[in-house]
Image: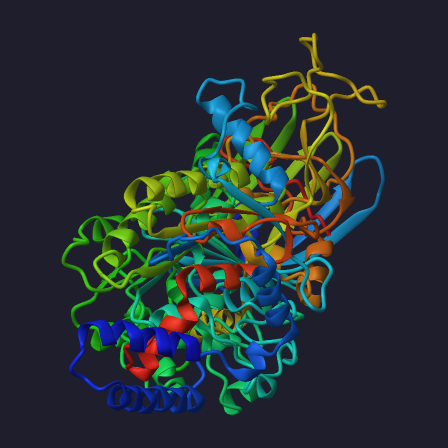
Amino acid sequence: MVSIFYLYINFLGRFAMKIKKTVLLGALTLAFSANAFADAKQSVIPDYQASNPWYTDAEAKLDARPHFEGEKKAKNIILFVGDGMGVSTVTAARILEGQLKGMQGEENNLSFDMFPFTGFAKTYNVDAQTPDSAGTMTAMMSGVKTDAGVIGVDEDVVRGDCSTATGNELVTALELAELAGKSTGIVSTARITHATPAATYAKSAERNWEDISDMPVSAVKAGCVDIASQLIGFEKNLKRRYPTAKRINGLEVVMGGGRRHFLPKDPAFNSPDARSATEGDRTDGRDLTAEWQTMYPNGVYVFDQAGFDAIDTSSTDKVFGLFNESHMQYEADRVNDIAGEPSLSEMTTKALGILDNNDEGYFLMVESGRIDHGHHAGNAYSALTDTIEFAKAIKETIANVDMENTLIIVTADHSHVFTIAGYPKRGNPILGKVVSVGKTEPALAADDMPYTTLGYTNGRGFHDLGNETNADASYSLPIEAGRVDLTSVDTETSGFHQETLVPRGSETHAGEDVAIYGKGPGASLIGGTNEQSIIFHVMNRAGRLDKKAAKALRGSWFD
Amino acid sequence: MFRSIFTLVLLISTTNIVMANCSNNILGAKYKITTGVTSSKQKKTSQFVLWRNGNQVAHEHIDTHITEVWEHLKNGQLRLVKNFDDYNRGIEYEPNEIKMQHNNAGWQLKRQLITQSLIDDMKLESTTKKGCEILQLFTRKNINDSLNLEWLPKQKLIRKLTITTKKEKVTWVLMEIINDTKQVQKLFTKKAGYHMTDYSDIGDNESDPFLLKMINLGFVSHGVSGMYNQYGSPIEGGHQH
C-alpha cells in the first residue's frame, strides 16, 4: 500500500510541478487514514462470515489458482441454478434435445456445454451427506456451507429454532451487488419464497417458513420474519443492516410463483385468475403485493402472461411478477395454464432488459426450480424438458448480454438418483427402452423383460400415465418399485414414470458432485473439484462485489 | 301398479331419512356401504359422508379418517385437498396434478357420486312424488353386471345403489341427509384450517414425519368403491388402505 502511495505521488508530481510534494503527501495521508477509519467502522462481510473456515478455505483456494493477467472484471453476474440438475440429467437432456432436433442426440450440446470453464462442486451440507436446496444455495450465495433446511444462515443455527438465527446471518452475493449500486433480480419457476430463490435474500432457521401461517407461534413471537415478508422488506432490512449505505434501492426484478404467500387468507384478495376459492395463505391480514406497490409506485406488479407481455423493459424500473399460487408449471404443462405463464427463458430475457438499464451493472439469479420436482416424482420427461428450457434461457441470455463484461455461471444445487444405463445403441431414444447395438428389438434383462435406458434408484417407481404431463400425478398411485413388463408400454410418453429399485414415497436427491460451468470474465477461476461454497467467491472476485460494496458504503473514490 | 305401491312403501318406510328440504347445494349425505363377495358370505361395511357446500364437495371416509375436499374452479377444472383428519394436515393438489376428467362429468362424479350420463343409460322403472320429493327407480343389466338405482333427482343424491357382478355385490344406502347449513360449513372451515403441504413439495420434505408416514400409507386415488362412470365401467378401484 505504501509503495502504491509513492508511485501515486510521483505520478502526480509529473503533472503538478508547482505543488510541493510534502503538502500533497500530507493531504493524501489524511485521506488514506480517513478511509481506513471508515473501513474499520463497517465491514461489508460480517467478521464471523469472513473468518468462517469455509470462507477462508475458498479464498485460499482461489488465491492459489492461476490468474489470467489483464482479465477484465465482471460488471454483470448471472447465476443460473438448475435445481436437481445433476450430470446425468445434463447428459440425458442433451441427448433428448438433440433427438428432438432430429439428431442422434449424443453429439448435441446444450448451450452451457459450450462454456469454456468447468469444475465440480461438492454439494454436501455441514450436517448432511446428501444435501437439500436450502443449505446448498446458501453455500453458493454466501460462500459458507451450512446445514440442510436453513436459509442464509450459518451452521451455528439450529433448524427450526428462531432464536438461533440472530447473529448467524450471512451476506449474499446479491446483497453485495445491491450495496454496490448494481441492479438485482431473481427469477424462478418455483415459488419465489422456495429454498433456492429465498437463499439470495432471506435469513431463516427454517426453509418452510414461507409465510406467517407456516411459522409456529413461538417463532413469530420470538421475532422471526417469514420469507415472503423478508422479500418485500429487502430494501428496508438491508438498509437497517448497513445504515451508511447510500445506494440500496431494492430488487429490480422478482419473478416466479408463490402468490399465496403474499396474500391474506381471504377470498376478497383473490387475484382475477385465482384457481382456489381462497388464494392467499397469510393469516396476518397483510397483502404484500399491495405493500410492494405502495413502496414502489413506479414498479409494475403482474400475475399473468398478458401482464408480463405488457412490461416495457426500457421504461420499467421494477417488476414483481407472481404467476402462480404455488410453483409455476412444468414447461411441458405450461400450455395448460389458464391465465398463461411466461416461460423461464421469457422471464430471463425480460429481466435482463430491465436490469441492464443500470450502468453500474447487475446481479441476476435464475433458477429452473422444477427439474427437481420432476425427478422427485420419478418422471424423467418433465425433468428433462425443464432442463432443455433452462438451457434455452441460457442460450438466449448469451445472445442478449455483452459477454465481455458479463460472468455467467451455470450449476446445480444437488443431483438426483437418476441413471442412464444399459448398452443402448447410438441414437437410441433416450426416453425409450434399451435396444442394443446392431439390434432392432428391445434388449431383455435376466427376467426376460425389457428395460428403459433411464431409471431411478429409489422412488415411487413405474407408472404409465400416458399423456399426463404433470409429473406429480404419480404421487397419487401406490408405490410400484421393482420390475414391470414394459413390452407394450410406450415409455417415451410424458406420463411415463421410470422403474425404481428401492421403494420410497418419493425419489431422493443424490450426493455426488455437480458440475459448474463458467463463461465470461472471472470464469477462469472455475476449475477442479471444489466445495460448493466456492461459487460465491468466484462471483465475488470476478465482480469485486465486496470491494464495490465497501466503496459504496464509504462513499469514497478509493477503490 | 304393485311396483309403484312397493316403491311408495319403501319411500314411506325409510323414516330415518329427512327429505323435506329438496335443495341440493348445501347438505351432508351419510352412506353405509356394504360389500359382499359372491363366493362367500363375508361382508364388509364402511361409512362415507358426502358433503356439499356450493362449489366444494367433501368425501369423508369415516373409517380411514381421510376427507377429500374437491373444489370446482371457475375454469371447470377440479382441485383437490386430501385431509388427514387424525393429523389435522392436508395435501393440496393442483388441477393438473390429478388424473381425471376435468369436465362436467368429472364434477358430477364428485358431487353426486354418479354421472348423469350413466343414469341416462339406465332404464327408468318408476317415479314417485311426495311434495317436492321425487324418487326414481332405475335399472340396468348387461353381461358384466346389473345395477339398481334409487335416485333422488331434486337432491341429486343416490338413495340406494346396488351393483352386482359375478364376483361381488356392493350396496350403497343413504342413511341420513343433513340440511343444517352451519354444520355443513363448519366441516369445510375445519378442514381449511389444517396445515397444508403442496403435493409437489413432498419430495423436498421427507424429513417431515407426517409426510413420510402419509406417503407410505398410500394415497386414496380412487375414492370409494362401487362407483361407475358414464361408460358403465367401474371407475374406482376400491380402497387402497
Q: In which quadrant of the rendered image does the C terminus of chain A lie?
A: bottom left
Q: Residue at image x 29%, y 49%? A: A339
The quadrant holding residue A380 is top right
Specify whether A399 is left or right of A123: left
Q: Does B241 sit above or below residue A295? A: above
Q: Nearer the viewer, residue A123 or A275?
A: A123
> Residue A333's spot in the image, x, y percent?
43, 40
> Residue B113's spot in the image, x, y percent?
52, 47
> Residue B29's spot in the image, x, y percent?
53, 60
Looking at the image, can residue A469 be seen? no
Q: In which quadrant of the rendered image does the N terminus of chain A lie?
A: bottom left
The quadrant holding residue A556 is bottom left
Q: Does A171 sit above or below residue A469? A: below
Specify whether A466 is left or right of A441: left
Looking at the image, can residue A140 be seen? yes
> Residue B193's spot in the image, x, y percent?
50, 74
Q: Residue at image x 37%, y 80%? A: A238
